[in-house]
Image (tube, rainbow, N blue to C red):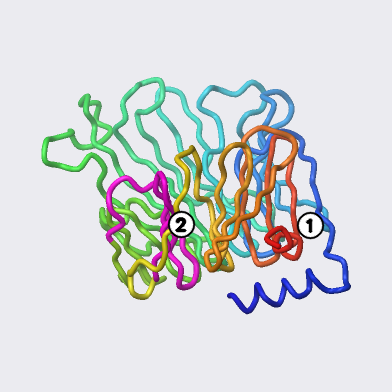
Amino acid sequence: MRALIAAIALLAGGSAAAPPAQTLRTAGPVTLLAADGSLAAAVVEGDNKSRCTQVVLWRPSSKPVVIKTQVECDGGGPLEGVDELALGGNRVLWEETNGGDNLELSVETATVAKPKTQDLSYVESGAGAAGDPGGDYTGNLLADGPLLVFVSWTSCDPYGGGYGRPCQKGQPDDYNGVLHRVVNGKDTVLRSGDDVLYPIWVDGGRILVRNGSKLTLLRTSGAALQTFDAGAGFQGAVFQGSNLVILRPTALDVYGTGTGTLIRTFHLKKAKRRLVDVQSGIAVLIGGGAVHLLRLDTGKGAGFTPTGGGTIQAQLEPTGLFMSSKTGLAFEPMARVLARFH
């Protein structure tokens, strides 16, 4: 990965000008962003009138592919929305929410070549107007390349409404965990068990699952590869290659994925921030209305502030940095990203 950074850095410093930044103005505010390689996916909020929420697939310098959903159009109900998004290769996954007394969750998928929505999963719980959290759920949509996963589970019923088993002391509230993998547009079971309820990141054919203060790295087969004790109170964890990056209130820790040992610590001022990605030895954090990049080899930082306001999101790929704002998407080629560190 460092060789890749060096090669692009030479390009950025050479006589050839870096490719220009590119933008895409969307029909409404972008609420979710995912990226993989040279492709980005964005959820564009509907207007609750004639325009439904859209999933937009965008490759800079190409015309975007727009996928229409069935939510937030024609004065839809308060439970309508899209709450999760993941992109792997040319396939996008998203979760739609809807319902009345019950909360309805459906996982959908489409591809660049086949943008027609395809149903993968549908579950219900009492967490709508009924106000009963018991029932079936899906979530934690994650993707990287050909590995696309999500998880399903059942929550106990504290009110005896029959949505799940009664909640009992000494029994977990969430149970019946299943880690699903999407293969060729079909839902398959990768691994069952309550130890896979909380997957938080995937990369390079591996899956990172959180269980309290413990992080477990799984193979694509679902077999455990490495376990880390991240300690209490950490705020996020991502990994790529040999780097596992963990965000704490005042520090960013880097561990080796093969050994589980702490490699280095970067001290941070206490502030609200999110760790959203790591790519090519660069960690990506968002805070204070800006995107902050930190090189894990030198500790040098760089920053970007997307125009347009609203909720800022970002994803770093070998091709460059994708960002979203209230008005749309922006892309900074990697040569321009690396030039910010000089």
Closest to the observer, 173 or 317: 317
Closest to the observer, 327 or 332: 332
Q: Secondary structure at mark 1?
A: loop
Q: Which residue in the protein does label 1 denote?
A: 60
Q: Which residue in the protein does label 2 denote?
A: 266
Residue pictured at 29% horizontal, 59% vertical: 192
At which x and y percent is residue 313?
A: 61, 44
Assign the N terminus to one quadrant of the image: bottom right
Direction from residue 46 to residue 275 in the image, left or right: left
Assign the C terminus to one quadrant of the image: bottom right
- Relative height, residue 96 to residue 211 (above, below): above
Residue 117 painted magenta? no
Asked if the residue under mark 1 is in contact with the one under mark 2, i.e. CB atoms within 8 Å, the reply is: no
- Relative height, residue 261 to residue 214 (above, below): below
- Relative height, residue 265 to residue 54 (above, below): below
At which x and y percent is residue 139?
A: 43, 46
Residue pictured at 45% horizontal, 23% vertical: 100
- Magenta segment range? 229-256
Closest to the observer, 285 or 206: 285
The amino acid pointed to by label 1 is: Pro
Instruction: For label 1, count other residues whose C-alpha is less than 10 Å away and answer few (under 14), some (14-19) or many (20+).
Output: many
Residue pictured at 41% horizontal, 41% vertical: 123
Residue 245 painted magenta? yes
